[in-house]
Amino acid sequence: MGKFAVGIISLVVGLVLGAIGALTVGGGAMAGVGVATGLTTGICMTVEAAEDIGLMTPDQVEEVLARAAENLSSVGGMPEGQQSEIADTSAECKNFMEKLRNQG
């Protein structure tokens, strides 16, 4: 299975587990954090994988991240105050993923 497929699967799994885990532990406020973390993890893993295998250039990654953040905010997909949790630049994705890797 390629890196891109792993990224897509991670997006789905991260979203589901983040939402379920957050609802179980802390209710509504924690759900926002869990969903934001799951979305950011999945999106960042997907665009990093696409960049690694040459499907996207760094500029295209920036465009995709900005568009994803814009689309998410336009549909009201995140609770108030949680929009800033979503990475919308390649540098933010790299920082987020580094923090995530260091936690484990």
Image: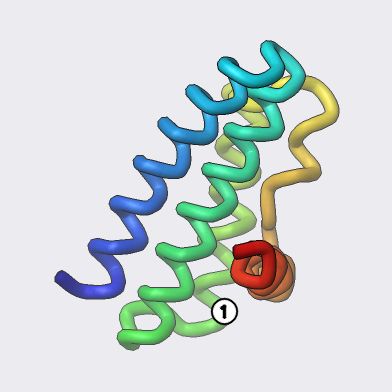
**Residue 92 at x, y = what percent?**
73, 67
25 on left or right of 49: right
15 on left or right of 103: left
Residue 36: name its quadrant: top right
**Residue 91 at x, y = what percent?**
71, 75
* Mark 1 crowdedness (10 Å alpha carbons): few <14, some 14-19, many ≥20: few
**In the depicted structure, whether residue 25 falls above or below residue 50:** above
- Residues 8 and 25: in front is 25
- Residues 100 and 78: in front is 100
The residue at which mark 1 appears reads as 59
Q: Residue at x 64, y 20 (%)?
A: 25
Report the label total.
1
Residue 104: name its quadrant: bottom right
Which residue type does callout 1 highlight?
Asp
Q: Residue furthest left?
A: 1
Q: Residue at x 72, y 71 (%)?
A: 95
Whether residue 76 is visible, yes or no, is: no
30 on left or right of 7: right
**In the depicted structure, whether residue 68 falls above or below residue 94:** above
Q: Residue at x 75, y 36 (%)?
A: 83
Q: Residue at x 64, y 22 (%)?
A: 31
What kind of element bears circle 1?
helix
**In the depicted structure, whether residue 52 falls above or below residue 21:** below
Whether residue 44 is visible, yes or no, is: yes
